[in-house]
Amino acid sequence: MCPFAGACEKSCLKFAGQNVYKQSQAARIRRTLDRLADLDGFVKILSHEISGLKRRAKRENMEAAYRPNVLSDDPKVARKLAEANPDVQFYDYTKIPKPWKRVRTNYHLTYSLDNHNHTEALEAIENGINVAVAFDLGKNEPLPETWEIPGTGVVLPVINGDEHDLRFLDPVGVFVGLRFKGSKAERAKAVAAGFVFSPRTITSQAA
């Protein structure tokens, strides 16, 4: 369900937390089969679940927000949910190119970087979409203040993407810095795969 997963596939959150348990995996498989069998019916089920979120948000005088894709990258489901629930703020990370064409008033997208989609990431930046970068950093290590997509000369401020997941609150024109979640061995594999980047990249101007 992630057609452009690429280098991040081996470090996917499906290998973390409760996602490693067989019952959680079975539940994801059932939901995926339901979505493939009946897209509109699947969206209706999710909308029914979202109605509970909206009621709770109203009681607590808060705004309802929902991330349709956590272990998937399915623009059809996200678009239909946003259309069916205009009073909810939807948001996602994506690696599908040209994300600016899929955003809506109540649907926000952040593009995810790896070593194989630099051109697409630059296009996203040019069209007002922020880019998320996973860094080779531990939990308490500081993020860089600015960073460059290696070899491009495009340097932008880095914000702390670990403070919260509400990407629609981010300013435009930044890299969303994320520290890798996992063991040092897993982080080393992600670096080798090209999904996790050094925070100390030397800019092409300095080189």
Image: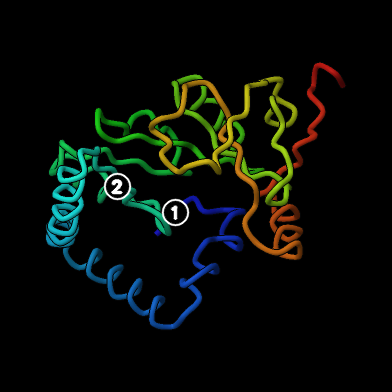
| Residue found 79% across the figure and 33% down from its top | 201
- The quarter of the picture where residue 200 lies is top right
Residue type highlighted by circle 2: Tyr
In-front residue for pair 145/193: 145
Residue identified by numbered label 2: 66
| Percent position of residue 69, x then y | 36, 52
Is residue 157 placed above or below 34 in the rendered structure?
above
Left or right of residue 44: residue 36: right
Q: Quadrant of the N terminus?
A: bottom left
| Residue found 15% across the figure and 36% down from its top | 86
Choose the circle earlier in sequence order: 2 or 1. 1
In-front residue for pair 112/23: 23
Left or right of residue 106: residue 203: right
Tell me the CA gap for discs 2 and 1. 21 Å
| Residue found 29% across the figure and 47% down from its top | 66
* Residue farthest along the front direction in this orientation: 60
| Residue found 16% across the figure and 37% down from its top | 87
- The quarter of the picture where residue 153 lies is top right
* Residue farthest along the right direction in this orientation: 207
Residue identified by numbered label 1: 3
Q: Secondary structure at mark 1?
A: loop
Is residue 19 placed above or below 200 in the rendered structure?
below
Is residue 15 placed above or below 87 in the rendered structure?
below
| Percent position of residue 196, x then y | 68, 48
Query: How many other residues sit within 10 Å of disc 1, few (<14), some (14-19) or many (≥20)?
Result: few
- The dot on residue 112 is none
Query: How many other residues sit within 10 Å of disc 2, few (<14), some (14-19) or many (≥20)?
Result: some
Q: Secondary structure at mark 2?
A: strand
Residue type highlighted by circle 1: Pro
